[in-house]
Amino acid sequence: MDYINGKDVLPEELLRELQRYVQGKLIYIPKRKNNRAQWGELNGTKEMFKARNHKIYNLYLKGKSIEKLMEKYSLSEESIRKIIANS
């Protein structure tokens, strides 16, 4: 996280208003919700699970049993069934 001096980026009026609440302290200003990445988007986890689930579904369509899929992917029966139902 980078440190930015408020006097360099904020209008003077807003800076004075903030100083009524906080002076000489670091303050974190979060991103707006619509600017935030969703879970797994930045590190590739979301795509990894999507690809895995696609493989599970295709194997199921080719006749692989739920029990074999559970064993292969170390997932519960409920998880495998959810993946199949949502594909």
Image (cartoon, grey):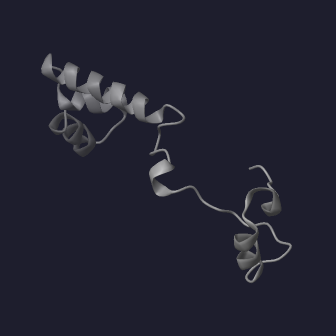
When the figure is inspected, residue 20 is found, relative to residue 31, above or below; the finding is below
What x and y, as percent, mark residue 26? 79, 66
**Residue farthest toward the top in the current orientation of the protein:** 62
Say which of 61 and 22 sits in front. Answer: 22
Which picture quadrant has residue 85?
Answer: top left
Judged left or right of residue 22, residue 82 is left
What x and y, as percent, mark residue 69? 26, 28
Residue occupying the point 37% across, 34% down: 74
Residue occupying the point 72% across, 64% down: 11
Which picture quadrant has residue 6?
Answer: bottom right
Judged left or right of residue 51, residue 12 is right
What x and y, as percent, mark residue 45? 47, 34
**Residue farthest toward the right in the current orientation of the protein:** 24
Judged left or right of residue 16, residue 42 is left
Judged left or right of residue 9, residue 42 is left
Residue occupying the point 72% across, 75% down: 18
**Quadrant that contains the C terminus:** top left
Residue occupying the point 75% across, 56% down: 9
When the figure is inspected, residue 4 is found, relative to residue 40, above or below; the finding is below
When the figure is inspected, residue 57 is found, relative to residue 21, above or below; the finding is above
The total of numbered circles placed on residues is 0
What x and y, as percent, mark residue 10? 73, 62
**Residue farthest toward the bottom in the current orientation of the protein:** 20
When the figure is inspected, residue 61 is found, relative to residue 83, above or below; the finding is above
Say which of 86 and 29 sits in front. Answer: 29
